[in-house]
Amino acid sequence: MKNLFRDCPQAAVDILQSLGVDLPATSLIREESPVFNTRPSDDLESDLVLVLGPPQQPLRGIAVEAQGDKSKDPVQLARYAAAGWLQPQCPFHVLVVTQDRKVAEYYAKPVMTGLPGYAFQAIVLGPHNVPVITTPGQVVAHPVLAAFGVAIHGRDPAVRSAFANGIALLPSDYTPAYTEHAYCIAPRDIQLLLEDDMSTTDWPVHSPFAKEHFGRGLTEGRAEGKAEEAARMLLLVLEARGLPVSEELRSRITSCTDLAQLESWTRKAANAATIQELFD
């Protein structure tokens, strides 16, 4: 699971924001050494450390811990936060990601540090708060959460269908990672369902896993009507974002046969504040 955050550092930021954490708006995100030193005692190493903002003026720090069990002492997470705050001298969050409900409950409890007035609280993403994503537009807007969501809620056919259709609209550089990570962190029964989907539907093939299970789609060439499907997905994204589409624009989208253009509009639609930004 930790590899997902290394492949896509923005994932940790997106998850924290989705859980209600107010983070500074910046495109500068860098990976730092995951070793927290508390000399003269010892070194503490988290799975991943990210710092937002320029090196000269860091804005926020994030330590990511992927936990499958309760083996790590919660006090150590508090030490991450304290050491992280001292090193870059900025507010510091600790994000714990787990697929086990009991593990999530364990690390969500406040840690009494012994410092007067201070109790440490990790931010936990687990089965209790991973959203059920059932539309391709939501997948495009939140691909990291969608990958976690299909791994946890993938017994629901609507979740698997939305994930497959949504990742097909993402830039091809990212889709293999989302597909692979979703499959790798899913329990075996959900993996079997994903394998069955890939062998019986037009699941987009971007990854070795998908190819192994004989999915049909991008590796076999663009299927007939691909542009038509891309236009439908674009309209779904706009609907999910709450962006109104006039009849004129709807006609422009549905009559477009340029697949690259439709995909470009869809990528813009994931973040556009107004419908006008889409076609600028």
Image (tube, rainbow, N blue to C red):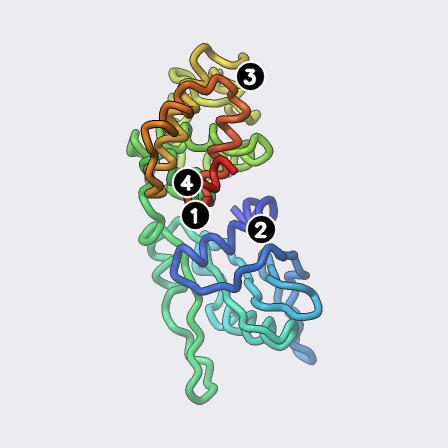
Under tag 1, what secondary structure? loop
Residue 247 in sight in this render: yes
SS for callout 4: helix
Judged from this view, the residue extending furthest toward the bottom is 116
Q: Kindly report the distance in space between the C-alpha atoms of the residues bearing marks 1 and 3.
A: 34 Å
Look at the numbered discs 1 and 2 and tell me whether their residues touch, using CB distance below 8 Å.
no
- Label 1 Cα neighbours within 10 Å, binned few <14 / some 14-19 / many ≥20: few
Q: Locate residue 171 relative to residue 34 in the image: left or right.
A: left
User: On the image, numbered disc 2 is attached to which residue?
Assistant: 9
Q: Separation of disc 1 and disc 2 at Cα? A: 24 Å
Q: Secondary structure at mark 2?
A: loop
Density class for disc 3 (Cα within 10 Å; few <14, some 14-19, many ≥20) is: few
Q: Is residue 94 above or below residue 110?
A: above
The three-letter code of the residue at mark 2 reads Pro
Rendered image: mark on residue 219 = 3
For label 3, the SS is helix
Q: Name the residue that disc number 1 marks.
A: 273
Q: Please state the horizontal and vertical placement of residue 217, each as a whole percent of the image.
A: 48, 17
Q: Give whichever of 82, 264 is nearer the camera.
A: 264
Query: Given the image, on which type of amino acid does mark 1 rest?
Result: Ala
Disc on the earlier residue, 1 or 2: 2
* Residue pictured at 36% horizontal, 30% vertical: 235
Mark toward the start of the polypeptide (2 vs 3): 2
Report how far apart the C-alphas of labels 2 and 3 lie in the structure.
Answer: 28 Å
Q: Nearer the viewer, mark 2 or mark 4?
A: 4
Q: Position of residue 105 (x, y in %)?
A: 34, 61
**Mark sitting on residue 275:** 4
